[in-house]
Structure formats: C-alpha cells, structure tokens
Amino acid sequence: MLALVLLGAGVGLALLWAPEDADQGATQRIFYLHVPVALTAYAMLGWGAWKALRLLWTREERYDLASYTGVHIGLIFALLTLATGSIWARASWGVWWDWRERQLVVFLILFLFYSAYFMLRYSLEPGGARGRISAVYALVGVVLIPVSFLAVRLADQFLHPTPLIRRGGPDIEAGMLFTFGVCFAGMLALGATLYANELTGKRLDARLRELREVLT
Amino acid sequence: MSSGDKYLWGAYLVVLLAVLVWVAIIALKLQRLERELGEIVELARRG
C-alpha cells in the first residue's frame, strides 16, 4: 500500500509537477524512474549478498532462500534499469546503447554476472552445498555494485549524466530533488514488497513440498 | 505528441507493464499454491 501511494505520488510529481529540464526537455523526466530503479537494483542485490553472508556465517539454511530472492528481485530491477536507460539513451543520444560508455558496460556485466547466478544454482543438486556455493557467488558479485556506482560518479567527461549530489550539496533544483526523493522511496518500497511477497511464496512452496513428502 | 514524449511514456509504460506482469505471476502462483494445498488436504484425509 505504501509502495502504491509513494509511487503514484512520485509518478504524478515527475510527470506533472517537476520543473522541465532546460537542456533535455521532457525526456529528462525518465530520470525519476531510471535512477530509483537502478538504486533499488543495487539495494536488492546488496540485500541478497548480505543474506548470503549470513548463510555462510551462521550456516542457517533459511538465509539461502532469502539470498536467492534478493538476487531474483534485484535482477528484475537491473533489467528494468537497462530498459529505461536504453530508452533514455535513444531519446538523448540518438542510440539505444553506446559501448564506449563504461558505466553502461559495467552495469551490463553486473546484470550478466547475476543472470549466471541462476544457471549456477539450478545446475546443482538442491541442498546445503547448493546454498553455500550460490551464497559465495552472490557475495563475489556484490563487488561489482560499488564499481558500477562509482563509475557514474567518476566519469564526468562521458555522455552518461553525472551524480545529482556532490560534496558541495545537491546539483539539481529543489523541486527535482524532492520528486526524485519521493520516486526513490516509492521504488524502494515496491522492491521491498516484491521481495517480501516472493520470499513468502517461495517459503510456502518449500513447506508444501515437505508436507507432500511426509504424506506420501 | 513529440518524439521526446513518446520515449518518456515508453519508459514509464515499460515499468508499469513489468509491475502488471508481476501481479499476474503472483496471482497464478497463488492459484497453484491453493490447488496444491487442496491436493495435500485430500492426501491427509485419505491417509
């Protein structure tokens, strides 16, 4: 419900209220969608890695499903980041993709790395070993998140827009920053809702399977 | 509608579509879980 309210308000503000960018015009409004989606992807993949660390640390099996769900939802947001970013690139630069842009390539590597997580997971027999190997893989991949995040912050000379908050304070107008804040909160809430629902579904699925095995 | 507007709406529609697909997947999953639960209840009654 919170996600719905925040996202509804955020989209309304982004499309109807936020001031129009003098340089990019209407297409700059994709920013209110693209950046929160990307940050939520980082948050979800990071959450998946955190749960993977908990699994390796405590050896408690329940963290395996939590880590898997975090990666699963993070990957959906990563795919949306690539899709919305590509549309924005076509509108602003005239191309769907530019291989010279390191930020784009780093994000694509991050996406492909976590896509391979599923291939690895489903190539192993279910059980403790699968959970631990998947957890190690999810943890290794988390290194790419700060690399991808920093690539945007360090690359001032490239086509990709630069960060909106610098050391001296926000680099954008207050109305734009407020709209971005609402959209980001909404997207995070959506990510958390997706995660909670998916995890409940997966746990329920596992319990039902156990119950069926007991009864047959 | 200008070319910029088309891309803007396109980007928002992609995300909306993704959310709708997710809702549909959740609905299908709930249906499957309900069916499986019914089967398990039936098994428990027989056993």
Image: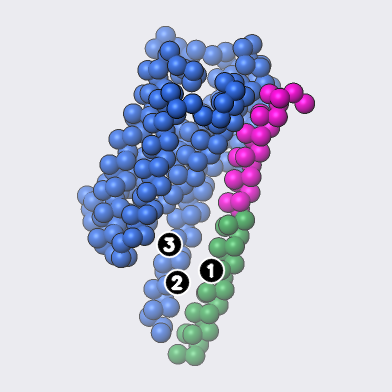
Chain colours: A blue, B green
Identify residue type, mark 2: Leu
Identify residue type, mark 1: Leu
Quadrant of the image occupied by residue A94 = top right
CA–CA distance in space, label 1 to label 2: 8 Å
Tell me whether circle 1 and circle 2 mark residues in contact (CB < 8 Å): yes
Q: In this rendering, does residue A33 appear at all?
A: no
Quadrant of the image occupied by residue A156 = top left
At which x and y percent is residue A161?
50, 19
Residue named by callout 3: A203
Element under label 1?
Answer: helix
- On whether residue A8 falls in the magenta region, the answer is no
Identify residue type, mark 3: Arg
Residue named by callout 2: A208
- On whether residue B11 falls in the magenta region, the answer is yes
Residue located at (59% from left, 67% from top): B31
Tell me whether circle 2 and circle 3 mark residues in contact (CB < 8 Å): no
Q: In this rendering, does residue B25 appear at all?
A: yes
Instruction: Between residue A25 and residue A73, name the one nearer to us.
Output: A25
Tell me whether circle 1 and circle 3 mark residues in contact (CB < 8 Å): no
Instruction: Between residue A151 and residue A195, name the one nearer to us.
Output: A151
Residue named by callout 1: B33
